[in-house]
Amino acid sequence: MVKDETYLESKATYCLDLAKKLGATDASVSVVNAISESVSLRNKKLDESNRSDSLAVSITTYINKKKSNITSSNLTDDNLKTLIERCIVTTKITPEDELNSLPDQQLLAREIKDLNLYDKSHIENEKKIAFLEEIEEAALKDSRIKDTETGFSENKSNFILANSDGFLNGYKSSSFSSSCVTVAENDGNMERDYEFTNRCHLNDLKKASEIGAIAAEKTIKKLNPKKISSEKINIIFDKRISKGILGAFASAISASSIARGTSFLKDKLDDGVFSNKINIYDKPDIMRGLGSRYFDSEGVKTETLKLVEEGILKHYLVDTYYGKKLNLKSNGRSGGTSNLYFENGLISYDDLLKLSPKSLYITETIGHGSNLVTGDYSVGATGFFVENGNLEYPVSEITIAGNFRDMFKQITLANDLEFDYATNSPTMMIEGMVVAGK
């Protein structure tokens, strides 16, 4: 069991009081307890079983506009006293930065709505193993599946965040996840793919048999891929891949990237960066949402942001420090996005496949090919050749390339959005991308 709020609050309060007593003009403290248990099987045999239980404190002290931070996993009062004394000494010799400060008190979260983010359920190892054995049994029904690797993780955490302006709050959260990787072989050709499920509550996970069956089906479909010639063609991104493009967008609109001038979206606020059919939301208050939270990492209240409205960029992701650099108020995005997603498109998945006589459907990308300074995008990829709305055959050893400035304007979305991750996207088509093949 994770430690309760009373214990965490007592440690946070002790640190704040001592920091002020020793000369800090302001201070903030976070105390976190996290427990993780995981089991994995490989080809029906137990491969690994782990458990971790971490307890940590992070203390930030301010002396006017000077600031320093220290962390530790030793929460005895004597050690905390030593840490704070060192932190104060370091703060005194740190150069001043006029932007250093706690968040504006008026922006701090005061009212907390229960989002049901914690499930106290616990699964013993034997039941985790039984769940994984059921996954592998479903995956191995087809004789072409030669290898399986499955895993199950259970994570629980509790934390308290406090600062010298009177903020003191925290909450418990949990997550349960399971995955299956399969390797298929046919006529000397081998391919791999996976299926994954992750939820805040145990009962919301996909069934074990479903996970195994989907992983096997995806893998078998990839067998005996063909090579294709280089050309300019419409690309359809599977939801697992299109969410990564949305993630790159989020990185490009972080206040830190904008303030440093390291984003291709610098100075694009209130400009049309997508087509007028695109809307993007960041919604922190989804019940049981994987990215849901009550406040950001500074204690600032979080509210739903419509980041992109009819193609127009309306907000950056702003924290306290870089917000001051940009002359913007924090919008509760210290630590990044919460539940980020594209609003559903207007056409079905099947109709998206039929939009052009031929296209490529991408199911996996290889490498990290996003340059957020220039907007250039280039990755290795595998997937399927699509003709007249049908996945005709698998393709491999291709590279797809473009620039986000152009790609964002050419996006068409299906209406198949699902909230399987903290960042989610419907199936996406981008017109006219460059494919390098044989």
Image (cartoon, rainbow, N blue to C red):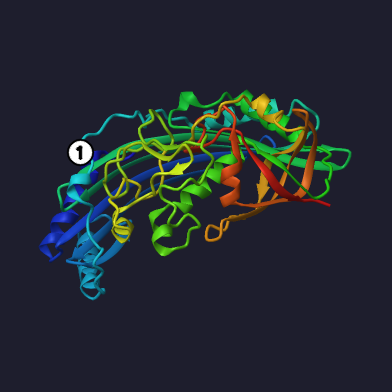
Q: In the rendered view, would you say 259 is above or below 429?
A: below
Q: Position of residue 243 (x, y in %)?
A: 55, 40
- Pick the residue in front: 303 or 363: 303
Left or right of 393? Residue 236 is left
Left or right of 113? Residue 205 is right
Q: Position of residue 253 (x, y in %)?
A: 44, 51
Q: In the rendered view, would you say 341 is above or below 320?
A: above
The residue type indicated by label 1 comes to Arg
Residue 181 in sight from this viewpoint:
no
In percent of the image, x 32 and y 37: which residue is there?
A: 303
The residue furthest right is: 187
Residue 61 in sight from this viewpoint:
yes
Q: In the rendered view, would you say 174 is above or below 244?
A: above
Q: Position of residue 204 (x, y in %)?
A: 48, 25
Number of numbered discs visible in the structure rendering: 1
Q: Position of residue 47 (x, y in %)?
A: 62, 42
Neighbor class of circle 1 (other Cα within 10 Å; few <14, some 14-19, many 20+) is: some
The image quadrant of residue 74 is: bottom left
Left or right of 211? Residue 312 is left
**Disc 1, SS:** loop
The image quadrant of residue 129 is: top right
The residue furthest left is: 21
Q: Label 1 belongs to which residue?
A: 110
Q: In the rendered view, would you say 92 is above or below 116?
A: below
- Pick the residue in front: 226 or 145: 226
Assign the N terminus to one quadrant of the image.
top left
Left or right of 86? Residue 178 is right
